[in-house]
Image: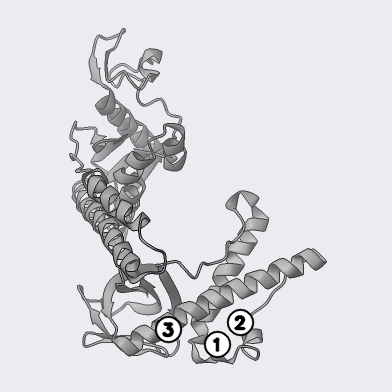
Amino acid sequence: MANKAYKFRIYPNLEQKVLFAKTFGCVRFIYNRMLADKIKYYERTKQKLNNTPAQYKKEFEWLKEIDSLALANAQMNLQTAYNNFFRSPKVGFPKFKSKKSNKNSYTTNCVNGSITIESGYIRLPKIGFVKLKQHRQIPSDYKLKSVTISKTPTGKYYASVLFEYENQVQEKAPHNFLGLDFSMHELYKDSNGNEPAYPRYYRQAEKRLKSEQRKLSLMQKGSKNRDKQRVKVARIHEKVANQRKDFLHKQSRQIANAYDCVCIEDLDMKAMSQALNFGKSVSDNGWGMFTAFLKYKLEENGKRLVKVDRFFASSQICSCCGYKNADAKNISVRAWVCPKCGTRHDRDRNAAINIRNEGMRIVFS
């Protein structure tokens, strides 16, 4: 069995918006209260506390008005984060959820048909039928498992619906391969010498964003005008994110349709942005999102995404004769001539070819 999520825009009425706000608040409250009790119990006994939302409903009766499965999912999320910290402190200790956050969400499960999608509406527990913009048809053999309701900083509501289905995709034997080398400015360069000319949406909006953020910083906290300006800033960020996501979806779809196997480097983008001080450029590039899109699109068609070790010297090896040129390790060297065979290399294309060849070796080994 496999899972697949569809994200739909929903349009709640005023009463439903109030119910959503109440649910968001209760989920945040139970998460924070349970976390605080876990901390106090551990400080006193040095043992873990296994608390549940049910034990708080007697003291806080208004929790009974909220979908119980939404509270249960908050408990599960907290327990997972809590256990992960004890397994590996590098993960970080769970943080309290802020009431001032402009992005809220909760998850509820489908039990005995409690959640349905029909005639342009989605039925949610304790909420009722909410108008839904269904942009694609759901296959009849898909089984609805859960729904995550989220509210963006701009005030839009979305329902991310998780379905379970029987995965009958058979893996295809790879015949045509493509290597992709990460590029800071153009997203990637492939082994055929092509690059997508990435528009760099954040950089395009940076001047306007700076102006609107400056206005926001000068406004009085808690005022209505500040809240209006906050939404303006959030809309710019949302537009940039949507433009980037649209571009990455289209690029990954073109590649997934054309090739059986795509080979990339297993890069640590967080470490790269910190080490090279290219945080904005790396974030605007969206390489991690692009590879995630590419992976699931390939797997849906029985194809493969192969990751080559990040320490593989793709830029230093001559793709023609295999000679390793240590001078090419310097990132400022954009083109070089192989001292052994005399082939002239473009740094990024040569790296993409080597990544493709190494990926082929991994597949057939």
Residue carrying label 2: 53
x and y percentages locating residue 241 in the rendered image = 28, 55
Residue carrying label 1: 63
Going from N to C along the chain, the mark reached first, 3 or 2, is 2
Which of label 3 and label 2 is nearer to you? 2
Residue 335 as seen in the image, left or right of residue 60: left
Name which residue lies at 58% across and 62% down: 81
| Visible residue check, residue 303 | no
Going from N to C along the chain, the mark reached first, 2 or 1, is 2
Foreground pick, 269 / 26: 26
| Visible residue check, residue 240 | yes
Q: Is residue 129 above or below residue 285?
A: below
Locate residue 314: give its quadrant: top left
Which of label 3 and label 1 is nearer to you? 1
Q: Are marks 2 and 1 in contact (CB under 8 Å)?
A: yes
Spatial separation of the CA atoms under disc 3 and disc 2: 19 Å
Foreground pick, 69 / 141: 69
Residue carrying label 3: 110
Three-letter residue code for mark 3: Cys
Please give the count of numbered marks on the rendered protein: 3
Foreground pick, 153 / 118: 153
Three-letter residue code for mark 1: Leu
